[in-house]
Image (tube, rainbow, N blue to C red):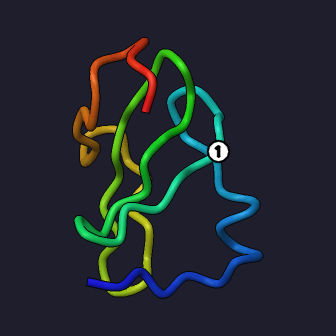
Amino acid sequence: MMIDLDPDVLEVLACPNCHAAFAVDPERSELVCTGPGCGLAFPVEGRIPVLLLDEARQARSPGTPS
C-alpha cells in the first residue's frame, strides 16, 4: 500500500519517542524511526500517521542499523 503523505508534512514529523526523523516503509504503511536506539514503527491509516507510542511496534532491535 502506498503512503500518500505530503513531503512537507513528512519533513516536520518526528518520532514521539526520540525525536528522530522517519523513513517511509510503503510495504507496511508505516513510518519507521531512524533514531539509532529507537527503531519504532508507526502505522499510517488513511493518510494519517498514528504517532501514539501505544500503537507503535518495534520494527528492529534498538541499536541495530536499519
Q: Quadrant of the N terminus?
A: bottom left
Q: Quadrant of residue 63?
A: top left
Q: Residues within 10 Å of mark 1 (few under 14, many from 20)?
A: some
Q: Residue at x 43, y 84 (%)?
A: 47
Q: Is residue 53 left or right of residue 24?
A: left
Judging depth in this view, the residue of 64 and 62 nearest the camera is 64
| Residue 28: image location, x then y, percent | 23, 65
Q: Total number of numbered labels?
A: 1
Q: Residue at x 43, y 57 (%)?
A: 31
| Residue 52: image location, x then y, percent | 38, 48
| Residue 6: image location, x then y, percent | 65, 84
Q: Is residue 66 above or below residue 5?
A: above
Judging depth in this view, the residue of 46 and 35 nearest the camera is 35
Q: Amino acid at mark 1?
A: Ala
Q: Residue at x 24, y 32 (%)?
A: 58
Judging depth in this view, the residue of 12 and 3 nearest the camera is 3
Q: Check disc 1 and report its element: helix, strand or loop.
A: loop
Q: Which residue is mark 1?
A: 21
Q: Quadrant of residue 62?
A: top left
Q: Is residue 51 above or below residue 20?
A: below
Q: Is residue 33 above or below residue 17?
A: below
Q: Residue at x 75, y 59 (%)?
A: 12
